[in-house]
Image (cartoon, helix red, strand yellow):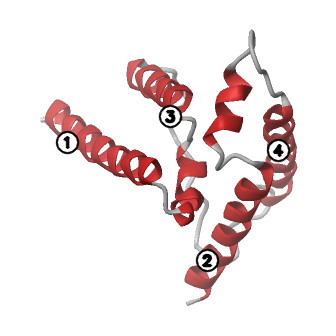
Amino acid sequence: MARILSALIIGLIFGSGIAISGMINPAKVLNFFDFTGTWDPSLAFVMGGALVVTAIGYFFILKRPAPLLDKSFHLPLKQQIDRPLIAGSAIFGIGWGIGGFCPGGSIPALGLMQTDVYILVGSMIIGILFARMMRRKMQC
């Protein structure tokens, strides 16, 4: 129960931060990518602040033998940059640039009750399922 409650609290904090920063507003996100037009650099400060907080958090948390609510840390073991990583990153970036939503911003934006958000999240779920299916087929 403590794990579920902590996940809920962390999700609420994350979603609130995304909403307050403006990352649920696709126009603001798209303006961040429009360097030659109506460029809005404010999201760079949001992302930079998140990077600093994450780096500090990792520095202190990873010194512990285990997390508070689990037996061990679940960190990625793979350290190589490979074709699936590059392809996934490119698809993520293109989708973010076209739609104005990243996955982290789209989930809190579901509360806006806008059709485009539901289409994006639905498409994201279909993409995740398709990628899993393709990964299984490639491993056979």
Taking the spot 57% from the left edge, 35% from the top edge, the residue there is: 100
Q: Is residue 104 above or below residue 102?
A: below
Q: Which is in the foreground here, disc 4 or disc 2?
A: 2
64 to the left or right of 113: right
Give the residue number, with chain letter if any, for mark 4. 55
Give the residue number, with chain letter if any, for mark 1. 133
Question: Disc 4 residue type?
Answer: Ala
Taking the spot 18% from the left edge, 30% from the top edge, the residue there is: 138
Q: Which is in the foreground here, disc 3 or disc 2?
A: 3
Q: Quadrant of residue 76?
A: top right
Q: Nearer the viewer, residue 134 or 96?
A: 96
Measured from the top left, where is residue 97 in percent x and y? 55, 26
Question: Disc 2 residue type?
Answer: Leu
Q: Quadrant of the C terminus?
A: top left
Q: Which is in the foreground here, disc 1 or disc 3?
A: 3
Q: Residues within 10 Å of mark 2 (few under 14, many from 20)?
A: few
